[in-house]
Image: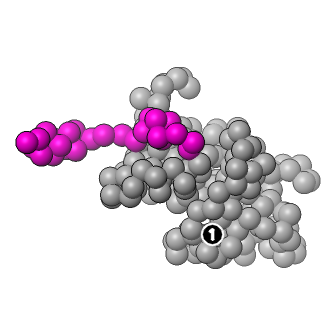
Amino acid sequence: MKSNRHGQSRVLDTNQLDLLISNLSDQYHQLVAEVCRRTGCRVGEATQLTWGMVSESAITFQRGITKGKLASRSVPVTPVLWEALRAWRDVWVVRQGRDPVAGDYLVPGQFAGSCLSTRSFMDALEKAAAESGLEGVSSHSFRRSALTSAHSAGVPLRVLMALSGHKSMSALQRYLEVTPAQRVAAAAAFA
């Protein structure tokens, strides 16, 4: 479990994710959390998204914002995420006083032309985790939870690699948590 920025971040279930996101103090922090939760992206990728990278069908994480900056990847947008993005767009228009253009950040930062800082998000997340009574939570909890949940639902590892951007199976497998119940079921399946 993650402690003092060391170790792996905690994998959360659906109810814990809902609670954690509801305890984030600002709507823009909630949006970043939803994007991370529903796409399995890193927080730095979510904060650097522009409106031009988002459509009703997919979010494209362009090469320049991904870890290693090696390749772009697209993740399909679920109806739940699309609704959150549409609602946020309405708030964005009111706050900015205009419609967004392709190069505008989804979540603008404190200074003109900047995006929300990952530090701002992580500070808010730390407070929300404490209010939720959840230990071992970090921004990577959304990514680990998304990938673990999809894997538990039977999504093939190769598909998870394509969505997460992992370049090797071993890197992806470090994200996946194995529950005690899964261990028991596996042992019961031994010949």
Q: Residue at x 32, y 53 (%)?
A: 152
Front one among 178 and 105 = 178
Identify the residue under disc 1.
58
Query: Is residue 74 at least partly visible in the picture?
Result: yes
Decide: few, some or many residues near mark 1? Use Cα within 10 Å; few <14, some 14-19, many ≥20.
some
Residue 104 at x, y percent in the picture: 84, 63
Residue 121 at x, y percent in the picture: 66, 44
Front one among 91 and 170 = 170
Residue farthest toward the right in the current orientation of the protein: 112
Quarter occupied by residue 59 = bottom right
Front one among 59 and 79 = 59
Q: Residue at x 78, y 61 (%)?
A: 50
Give the residues in magenta.
Answer: 166-191
Residue 13 at x, y percent in the picture: 37, 51
105 horizontally vs 172: left or right: right
57 horizontally vs 104: left or right: left
